[in-house]
Amino acid sequence: MRPGLFGLLLALLGGAAPALQAAPGPAFDCAKVQPGSMAALVCADAGLVKLDRQLAQVYSQALKKTAKERPPLLKAEQRGWVKGRDECWKSQDKPACVKDSYVRRIAELQARYRLLPPQGPIRWACDGNAAKEVVVSFFATEPPTLVAEFGDSSSLMFAERSASGSRYVGRNESFWEHQGEARIVWGYQAPEMVCRQPR
């Protein structure tokens, strides 16, 4: 075999072997996490690593929208979210708890900071009073979300399973729409409002 051909063959065989590259890790440094922590769980799970990187990207987009926010509430909220995620150590199914925490945070940031185009806003007049208006914007997040505004307050709500119509639930608010009529609860133990879109 000619030397040149032998060298070419070696090069081809070497090129055929896949290059071993370390899979990208999460957005934080796994070398600095405490063993047994929820952060360590993220580092060891490829699906959670992917979610962490997605959250880092979405969070960065949200930060750009709040660059002039004073005080910088988003950063404080994100630190609070990390503490909440780390509470998953109490869960029977820690990976599922951590995954749900990431999924909901990503959806929350995408909706609250309008990182995805909304469907709406859609106006609902409640209890037959045009001045008693709830304005709703829907977002194709995963899970689906909406942001509702009533008076000077707003609420982020997540879609929940419903036997009929569309149902969303927030901290102390809920929105259930069925056949053109919405039933909205706004506030802890508040009475239900019956709302329709003005003609």
Image: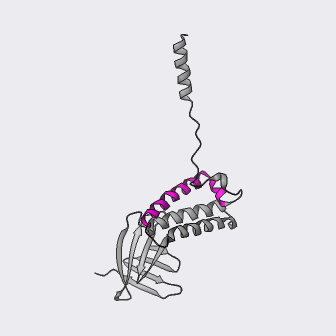
Q: With respect to residue 28, does 65 lie above or below?
A: below
Q: With respect to residue 104, does 9 lie above or below?
A: above
Q: Nearer the viewer, residue 71 or 152?
A: 71
- Image quadrant for the N terminus? top right
**Residue 52, quarter of the rendered image:** bottom right
Q: With respect to residue 131, does 11 lie above or below?
A: above
Q: Furthest residue to the right?
A: 35
Where does the image place residue 139, in percent across and percent down from the top left?
A: 42, 67
Residue 44 shows in the view:
no
- Numbered label tally: 0
Residue located 47% across and 83% down the image: 185
- Image quadrant for the C terminus? bottom left
Q: State whether the magenta stretch is mostly helix, strand or loop.
A: helix
Q: Nearer the viewer, residue 69 or 83?
A: 69
Where does the image place residue 90, in percent across and percent down from the top left?
A: 69, 67
Residue 83 shows in the view:
yes
**Residue 141, quarter of the rendered image:** bottom left
Where does the image place residue 194, in percent across and percent down from the top left?
A: 41, 85
Q: How is the image coloured?
A: one colour
Q: Furthest residue to the top?
A: 1
Q: Which residues are magenta?
A: 38-66
Where does the image place residue 167, in percent across and percent down from the top left?
A: 47, 74
Q: Nearer the viewer, residue 92 or 46?
A: 46
Q: Is residue 119 left or right of residue 184?
A: left
Q: Is residue 50 magenta?
A: yes
Residue located 52% across and 80% down the image: 172
Q: Is residue 10 magenta?
A: no
